[in-house]
Image (cartoon, rainbow, N blue to C red):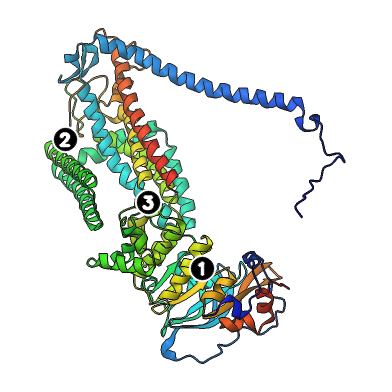
Amino acid sequence: MANTTDTGVSVTDETTSDITVEAPTAAAPEAAPASTPVDPADLVFDVSDLSVYYGDFRAVRDVNMTVERNQITALIGPSGCGKSTVLRSFNRMNDLIPTARVTGDLIYRGVDLYDPRVDPVEVRRRIGMVFQKPNPFPKSIYDNVAYGPRIAGQKKGLDEVVESSLRKAALWDEVKDRLGDSAIGLSGGQQQRLSIARAIATQPEVLLMDEPCSALDPIATARIEELMAEIKSEYTILIVTHNMQQAARVSDRTAFFSVELDEHNDRRTGLLVEYTDTAKLFSNPDDERTENYITGRFG
Amino acid sequence: MSDITVPTRSSGTTLSLDALSGPAARARKEGAIKAVFFLAATVSIIVSAAIVWSLVREAWVFITEVEWANTWGQNGWFPRQGLYDMPTLLVASLIVTVISMLVAGPIGLGSAIYLSEYASRRTRSILKPVLEVLAGVPSVVLGFFALFFLSPQIVERISRSGWLIIGAVILTGYVAMMVIWVRRTLQREASTSAAQMFTRIIVLTLFVLVGLVMVWWILRTAGSGDAGAANFFQVKRSGQLAAASIGVGILTIPLVASISEDALASVPRELREASAGLGARKVTTTTQIVLPAAVSGIVAAFIIGVSRVIGETMVVFMAGGAADAARFTDSPFEGGLTMTAGMASLATGTDNVVGEGLTFQSLYFVGFVLFLITLTLNVIGARFVRNVREKY
C-alpha cells in the first residue's frame, strides 16, 4: 500500500482538487495502458470505450480500464470529470436516471453488464454501493443491515449476517446493545460504517464507494480507510475520492480523470487521462495533465 | 500578520452615528407596512373567535335546555318535532366517511405513488394538472353527478350479491393489510420491549374488532337496498347515502393524492438509491422504504381527507336522499342525513327555522359537534405533517 510520504505527493490541501481543470493539450495521448499484464482469472472489470450520455450530452467519453480482484482502485479528478458517473455505471445505478445512456463495453467477469438480458437488480446484488452521504433507512440498525438479505429472500440466519457485517464494518462493538434503535440516531461516521455494513450484508463481490468520506471528519475518515484495508482481501473495491491523499493512502491503482471543454457548445466532457499503479501515478505520472493536477498546478 | 485593517470610506477611524442610522422615512414606511399586515392577521383571528363564540352560545342553550332523552335512541332526526336523534346524523356521517374514504384513500394514494415513483416527467406534467382540475370541480357539480348518475346508474343497480362482492373485496384488502402488518412485525428479530408488545396487541385487537364490525355491517345491510324508494316520512326522492359517499370520495381524491404525494416526494432520493443499490426492485423500494418513510404524511393525508369528508355538505345534501328529517338507518342504500346535510337542509332560503322550541339551537349544537370533530382531526393531521417535516 502506498502512502503519502514515499509517493512524494506534495499536495496538502484537499480544496485544490475542487478546482476544475481543463485539458491543456487536446492532442495528448489518451489513457495509458496498464503497466503489467493481468491474469484473466483475476480480471473483474474490463472496460473499453465506455461513454456515458445524459440525453445528447456526453458526460464521459472513451474510458478504457481494467480492474483486478482484491484491489482497491481509486478514481480521482476535478469536479465534473465524470468519475462518479463512471463509478455508477459499474453497477447500473445510472439506469435510475431516465435520460442516462451508456455506450461501449463494460465486461464484468466475462459478461457485458449492458447486455439487454442483464437484470440491473442482479448486477447490484453482486456489485454493492456506498454513497457519498450516509443514508441509513429510517429503520432500526438491525433492519438496515438485514434489508439487503431480506429482499433477496433470506429468512433464516439473519442475526448472524447482521452481526458479521457489523463486525466487518467495525461497528459491532458500538451498536451491539442497541440494534433495535433507529439508525438515524447514529453519528455521521457510524452511519457511513452502517452503510458499508449494509452493503456488505448482501455479500457482494465488488464494493463501489462514491466519495464515502467526504461528509466525515478526519477521525471517522481514518476509520473508514482502515476498514477498507481490512476488507480488501474479500472484496474488490472501487473508490471515487476528491481527496488525493486518500487515494494515495488506500489504493493500489489510481485512475485520473480530467475534463475537456467543447468550444462549440460550451459543455464539459470527462475523460480518463491516466490509469496506473498508485505509486507511479503520484510519483512519476506519464501525462502532463496528471502531473499538473497532483502537484496542484493547473494549465 | 495579526493586524487586520478594516478599510473605511472616511479616513478617520470613528464614524458618526448619522452615517449608520439610515433615513427616517424608510423606518416609518416599514412601521406602516407592518401595521397593515398585523391588522390582517388580527382580523382573521377575531373572525374565527367570533364564529366559535356564536356557535358555542346557541349550542349552550341547546345543551342546557334540551331533553336529553330526545337526542338518543329515537327513530330518527326530526328537529321540527323536537326529536334530535344524534345517532341518526352520526351514523350517516360515519357511513359517508367510510365509503368515501374507501374511494378516495386507495385511488388518492395510488395516484400519489404513481406520480411520485413511476411516472416519467412527461406523464407527470400531464397528470398533475388533471388532478388539480378535479380538485377545482365545484361540489355542487359533483352533487348533480352523484344524484343523476351515481345514484340511478350505479348504486341502484348494486344487487345484494353485488354488495356482498364489494364487501368481500374490501375485506380481502383489509385482511391483506393486517397480514402484511403482522408479518412485518414478526420479522423484526431484534429485541422487543414489553411496551412495544403491548401496543402491538392493542393494535391487532383494534384491527380485528374493526374487521368484525365491517363484516357484520356488510352482511346486515346487504340487499337492504330498497334503493330510491320513498323515505318513510318524505316525498319520494332519489339518492342514497352510498351515491353521496362516492361523490364525496371523488371530490376528496385530489386532496389525499396531493398531500400523500408531498409526503412521498419529501423522502430523500438517497434512500431510494441506497435501496436500489442493495438490489431492490422498484416495488420493493416503494413498499419497504418510501412508504414507511412517508407514513406519517400519508396518515396525515387520510386524516385531513376524513376531516374534509365529514365537513362536505353540498354533495350529501343533494344526493343523500333525505331532506329536513330522516329516519335512522345504517344502510348506505337508503336516504339519510349527515350532520352537514341535516344542518343545510334545515337552514335554507328564506324559510325561517321553525318548530318545537329548540329546532334553531339544535343546528348550532350539531355544528358545534362537527366543529369539534374536524378540529380534532385537523390538529392530529397537522401533527403528523409536522413529523414528516422534522424527520428530514
* Residue A41 visible in the picture: yes
Label 2 element class: loop
Label 3, label 1: how far apart the Cα atoms are: 27 Å
Q: Which mark is residue B225?
A: 2
Q: Is the C terminus of chain A in the top left, top right, bottom left or bottom right quadrant? A: bottom right
Label 1 element class: strand
Percent across and percent down for residue A25 are 72, 79
Residue type beneath disc 1: Ala
Q: Quadrant of residue A235?
A: bottom left
Q: What chain is tagged by disc 2?
A: B
Q: Residues within 10 Å of mark 2 (few under 14, many from 20)?
A: many
Residue type beneath disc 3: Ala
Front residue of A118 and B150: A118
* Mark nearer the viewer, 3 or 2: 3
The vertical placement of B54 against B385, above or below, is: above
Nearest to N terminus: mark 3 or mark 2: 2
Percent across and percent down for residue A242 are 58, 68
According to the picture, the residue beneath numbered tag 3 turns out to be: B293
Instruction: Evaluate whether label 3 is on the same chain as label 2.
Output: yes
Q: Residue A70 carries which label?
A: none
State if disc 1 and disc 3 touch (CB < 8 Å).
no
Percent across and percent down for residue A250 are 51, 75
Instruction: Evaluate whether label 3 is on the same chain as label 1.
Output: no
* Mark nearer the viewer, 3 or 1: 3
Q: Which residue is drawn at 20% across and 19% down?
A: B85
Residue type beneath disc 2: Gly
